[in-house]
Amino acid sequence: MIVLLFGVMYFMMIRPQQKRRRQAEQMQSSLTPGTEVITIGGLYGTVVGVDDESVTLEVAPGVHTRYARQAVARVVSEAEGAGDVAAEPADEAEPAAEPVNPVVDERRK
């Protein structure tokens, strides 16, 4: 019974964690200049430089910051030429509708 319990724990907890760790390591090792990423702190930036232990991000035009590779949480978009998924341009997008708040609307009457 105990062996069965450890077997279930391995397949339900340990193995998925190892898979996530391998995927994160692969993503962090495949970073290239031009890739847009999000750090673990929620900062969006574009990779401008990569070395063995750190990544340099451009967070605003002309503002470069250096982070450990492990601080990159996920890739937002790949570098140009790696299969762009073009978003609709902002000037052609439909305008957002104003949110309706019934409490505020009643006060205006």
Image (spheres, grey):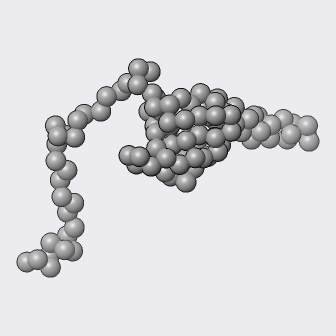
Q: Is 58 placed left or right of 107 in the picture? A: right
Indicate the position of residue 71 as horizontal and vertical percent values: 61, 46
Q: Is 21 placed left or right of 73 in the picture? A: right
In the image, farthest residue toward the front: 62
Quadrant in which residue 77 is drawn: top left
Indicate the position of residue 88 as horizontal and vertical percent values: 25, 33
Q: Is 65 placed left or right of 89 in the picture? A: right
Instruction: Tell me if residue 30 comes above or below residue 59 in the rendering.
Output: above
Which quarter of the rendering shows the C terminus?
Answer: bottom left
The residue positioned 19% from the left and 50% from the top of the image is 96
In the image, farthest residue toward the left: 109
2 or 34: nearer the viewer: 34
Mark yes or no: residue 103 visible.
yes
Which quarter of the rendering shows the N terminus?
Answer: top right
The residue positioned 64% from the left and 41% from the top of the image is 54
32 or 21: nearer the viewer: 32
Numbered-mark total: 0
Mark yes or no: residue 45 visible.
no
The residue positioned 31% from the left and 28% from the top of the image is 86
The residue positioned 59% from the left and 34% from the top of the image is 50
Indicate the position of residue 70 as horizontal and vertical percent values: 65, 43
Indicate the position of residue 103 as horizontal and vertical percent values: 21, 74
In the image, farthest residue toward the right: 2
